[in-house]
Image: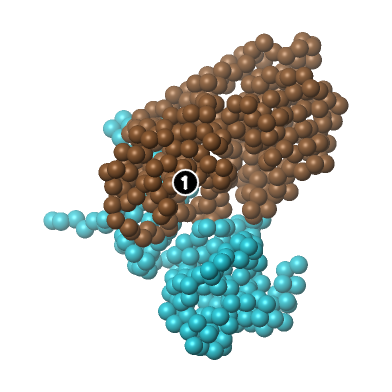
Amino acid sequence: MSFQVVHPGLLTTIQDLGRYGSQKYGVIVGGAMDSYSLRIANLLVGNDEGEGTLEMTLVGCTLRFERDLLIAITGGDLMPAVDDKEVPMWRPVLVRKGSLLSFKSARKGCRAYIAFAGGLVVPKVMGSKSTYVRAGIGGFLGRALKKGDSLSCGELNATSRSFLQQLSKLQRHFAWSVNHETIIRLGQAQTIRITEGAEYDQFDEMSKQRLIEELFVLTNSSDRMGYRLEGPPLALNEKTELLSEGVTYGTIQIPPNGQPIILMADRQTTGGYPKIAQIISADLSSLAQLRPPGTIQFEVVSIEEAENELWKNEQIIASLKIGIQLKV
Amino acid sequence: MKKETNNALIKPLGDSALIVQLGEGIDPSIHKLVGELTRLLEIHPFNGYIESVPAYTSLTVYYNPYIVHQSITDGLPKSPFRYVSVYMENLVQKIGKQPGSEEKLVTIPVVYGGEYGPDLEYVASHHGLSPDEVIEIHSKNEYLAYMIGFAPGFPFLGGMDERIATPRKETPRTSIPAGSVGIAGLQTGVYPLETPGGWQIIGRTPVDLFLPDQQPPTYLQAGYKIRFKSISVREYTRIKELKS
């Protein structure tokens, strides 16, 4: 055993980059809401970037460490502390055996990630460690963490061992950290870029204008499955019945009440509401860090622009990987 | 000479997926084309292809744009979206000429009525039929699983007899047991997981539709033909016991 859950927080689940390859069977992808934060957390402790981590939502957990462990905390700022002393985010941190790692409620952003060097030891289900709560599979016993749960971490690799040894000698935290601000924005008023959706042309002109000119507010009935927005109603030129078809992370559907629903990590695999737009992949992490009642201003870009934004972010992560290796 | 081409509409789904639409309406012949395209893509995937989801008239194709981008060579569209669009358009030209794949017929045993199907009486009285007549009509037709979605292993079935089409319940139940067989309008289906729902529940199957430890992880797949078979409570219990 590596650590024990003292308080589970609001919703703490094991997530990796998601369960791909089984959507045709109706199995959801799931995975981290903010995948950039998850990847960076893993890279900081020497893991593969897609390793399972703990994802916390709005109110974080408290963990008792039963071993010295190398961890990294990324994502939203849920005020992490070790034995009540503030602990820095976005860098590798050594937490000593017997210490309590605790979080409070979100002061910036919405979700935080803890990566553990060596990864979390849980079986992969259909190729992923992500928790699929509704089906009761994946993650830790197919559910969110509860008080008293004990989890184990895997074997350390050379990078993890090097950081662990450096920190043991140093007797303080590293002075360096990752600058995440270029790829993950934590503000409560976000400009989120979109591309036109499959049914964009079927919406009336006023709705198309409202979509980009007015603000939309994230409501409390938002979760890992979908973000429900409140704003000026959006409507089709004429009512049409659509057949269900495959959808994806960031698809913006407009149900009959005209209020947008953005499909998030735990979305169903298929949907039948008209798709007015699609969040660009480069902005999904920033969107996932928005908490109710945050506001969204949409901005339309072309698919080529969306692709270019993605390359930029991938280049940042690629140089981060090199930078981290240089610290070993 | 005019070349015979299949019509495909490529619809965007952002920078990491697109939808290939092959027609309109719930129609077994369109669905057959979707099935062929799905198989063809699985046999001839492009670099960066992740997976695809077949639906009534379309196939949604998921890809990793960064891997597609890295494997694009000179002379091909530079944008992954354009590249995958062209790739899929070319694949579409190859369908409709191949012999159809073998159709698989799956029988789903169902206990109708009683505590297993609390709405059977309602469905019967709604149409002025006896419960036995509803069972006979429901278990006589052969259904086509157009797609799997909504929940793991949940089939969207076509082919139900209009005589038993019944509107959803006014107030949805907070919990419907896994295996429940329901009717909603002209649709019929089986709930793989315990969920809330508004369908009229007429029976329950002892068969597990979602098998997370197996490959494939579901009992049914898109394209399967399905028939329901009426069984007794005793048979239901026996099948349940066999599994455990």
Position of the N terminus of chain A, as image quadrant, is: top right
Chain corresponding to cyan in the figure:
B
On screen, B7 above or below A224?
Answer: below
Q: Residue at x 56, y 18 (%)?
A: A179
State the count of labels.
1
Could you tell me residue B244's position as x and y percent? 76, 67
Kindly state the secondary structure of the residue where label 1 is placed: strand
Q: Residue at x 54, y 26 (%)?
A: A186
Could you tell me residue B111's position as x and y percent? 64, 79
- Examine the image and state in which quarter residue A158 appears: top right
Could you tell me residue A148's position as x and y percent? 82, 41
Could you tell me residue B103's position as x and y percent? 46, 70
Q: Going by the image, does B45 lie left or right of B177?
A: left
Q: Going by the image, does B148 lie left or right of A153?
A: left
Residue matched to label 1: A261
Q: Residue at x 42, y 32 (%)?
A: A297
On screen, A134 above or below A169?
Answer: below
Q: Callout 1, which amino acid?
A: Ile
Chain A: drawing colour: brown
